[in-house]
Image: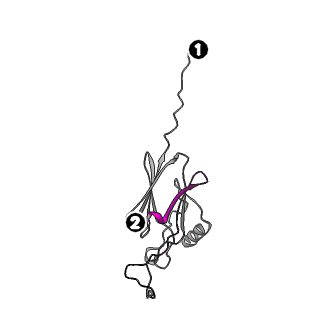
Amino acid sequence: MSTVVEALSELLNFPETIEKFVLSSSRPNDGDHHHHRRSTFPADILDTPKEYVFYMDVPGLSKSDIQVTVEEENTLVIKSNAKRKREDGEEEGCKYVRLERRPYHKVTRKFRLPENCNLSAITAKCENGVLTVVVEKLPPPPKAKTVEVTIS
């Protein structure tokens, strides 16, 4: 059942919400993962007091292969249009006998950001196959003070 839900979710490209993930078990069965390869970036999201930090595995991709944007005012979008690069020693006219290390092709992940995000303070870095996106939180609104007025 979760495979069907995952397929529908990817097909319809529903944004995920940080506060509650509708699909709690979005991982394929560990024993069968090579048959159901998902074309997506696995993501961990850390909620700290000052920011949200997204960690995504992007093996083999460089920062020029990845695009990070905010759409529709509060949707964080991570895209890749990476193509397989020729390996060292690979020559014209050669062909692979087996090809298991498939790169991500036209992958898009969307995350709906909460209202307390500072959209002008988003940073991203790609290092050692991990994309880290940091979204700062806005300071909480000041609490309304209750002023007691004496009645004369």
**50 or 31, nearer to the observer:** 50
Q: How many numbered marks have been drawn onto this rendered protein structure?
A: 2
Residue 70 image point, x, y percent:
56, 54
Mark 1–mark 2 Cα distance, whole angstroms, equals: 67 Å
Residue 36 image point, x, y percent:
50, 76
- Boundaries of the magenta span: 63-84
Q: Give the farthest residue toward the top.
A: 152
Query: Image check: 63 left or right of 5?
Result: left
Residue 92 image point, x, y percent:
45, 85
Residue 120 image point, x, y percent:
52, 47
Residue at 42% from the left image edge and 70% from the top image edge: 60
**32 or 41, nearer to the observer:** 41
Q: Which residue is mark 2?
A: 129
Residue at 49% from the left image edge and 79% from the top image edge: 35
Kind of element beneath mark 1: loop
The answer to whether 58 is drawn above or below residue 92 in the figure is above
**1 or 10, nearer to the observer:** 10
The residue mark sitting in front, 1 or 2, is 2
Q: Which residue type carries mark 2?
A: Gly
Q: Give the farthest residue toward the front.
A: 92
Residue at 58% from the left image edge and 60% from the top image edge: 15
Query: Image check: 47 left or right of 11?
Result: left
Q: Reply yes or no: does residue 38 show up in magenta.
A: no
Q: Which residue type carries mark 1?
A: Ile
Q: Which mark is residue 151?
A: 1
- Marks 1 and 2 close (CB-CB < 8 Å): no
Residue at 42% from the left image edge and 49% from the top image edge: 48
The answer to whether 145 is drawn above or below residue 131 in the figure is above
